[in-house]
Image: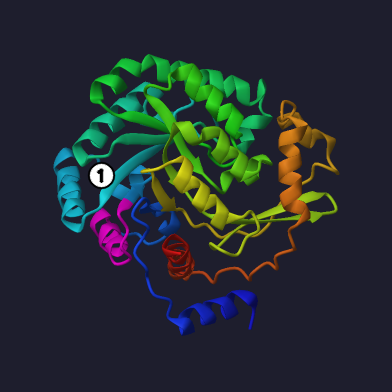
Amino acid sequence: MNRRTFLRAVAGSTALPLFPAAPDVRFGLDLFSIRSQNWDAFQYLDYAAKFGIKVVHFSEIRFIGSLEDEYLKKVRAHAEKLGIQVEIGMRSICPTSSAFDAKAGTAQEQITRMLHSATVVGSPFVRCFLGTFNDRRTDGGIDRHIGNTVEVLRSVRSRVVDSGLKIAIENHAGDMQGRELKSLIEAAGKDFVGACLDSGNPLWAIEDPHLTLETLAPYVLTSHIRDTAVWRVPEGAAVAWVRMGEGNVGIAEYIEKYGRLCPGRALSLEIIVTGPRIYPYLADAKFWDAYRTTPAWEFSRFLAIAERGKPKPSDPPVPKGQEAEREREDLEASIRWTKERLAA
């Protein structure tokens, strides 16, 4: 029996109760956690309701299925019947990022379309992101892409303000460290731009997620929460996303701190379980080309996490055709763990 199978058996045999979330925390779910289900919006909402989820984050258009007004009105009505707040999002709004989809229109056109959809479906903001860690390695580094994203946001400011909504920029896939996203928000305008705070992505940017939270707390509009295992390897450090409670970044303390620093904001699980990614900061001098402006004191906090970590055995690949089931297992185990912490 491997470690994953053992943990799953223990979770099932103990029949952990689903405690109600703490009254000052709106417990939510980012649907990327169950991205392989091929469900429609109503099925996603019904699934979330079974676990007492109060916020469902449709982080990409594909999860909600359609942006037609009549369809969105039906989604909103169904969510309201279940007592669920809907949040919606899109992907990259940075025209120079490799993650940007120019086929969907200009960044301004895409944002405008999503603002209208957010209004119809009842989302208080539109979530989006700059790009990925690959953008740090391009000419001009991440600063060039931050500047271009700021220009886009400033150009749509009046549309956002007139809509009564906000734009929530995620620290996404290792694109920006907390300090960099803060600078983007302040340069664009914190009156209409805030943060979608992800607790797993800072580790992809060699940053302590607690530092990211402390830096971005005043700007947080919503969140993506997951745990991470980090440990030393000869080349530098290994980073693997894991189920809640299986990492070593102090995720229980993170949740408590999030509740204090970001009261009223949704605490939404985005569970992604991965094998280790290696960050060769000791073995590859070119690695640092993407992180020349990272202060030593900030990196030392990442190092401290890696130093106290222990290697996590890689789980065998998920058999083809079982991805959807595994995602539900990972998510439901994480829901149980998180609800226990919220009820403690």
Q: Is residue 51 magenta?
A: yes
Q: Position of residue 71 (x, y in %)?
A: 17, 45
For the N terminus, the quadrant is bottom right
Side of 137 where 334 appears, left or right: left
**Magenta segment boundaries in residue numbering:** 40-55
Side of 257 where 283 appears, left or right: right
Vertical comparison of 250 with 343: above or below: above
Q: Is residue 324 magenta?
A: no
The residue labelled by disc 1 is: 66
Q: Nearer the viewer, residue 236 or 63?
A: 236
Instruction: Give the residue drawn at x 27%, y 56%.
Output: 40
Q: Quadrant of residue 52?
A: bottom left
Question: What's the colour scheme?
Answer: rainbow
Instruction: Give the residue drawn at x 30%, y 54%.
Output: 54
Instruction: Give the residue drawn at x 43%, y 76%.
Output: 16
Instruction: Give the residue drawn at x 65%, y 43%.
Output: 208
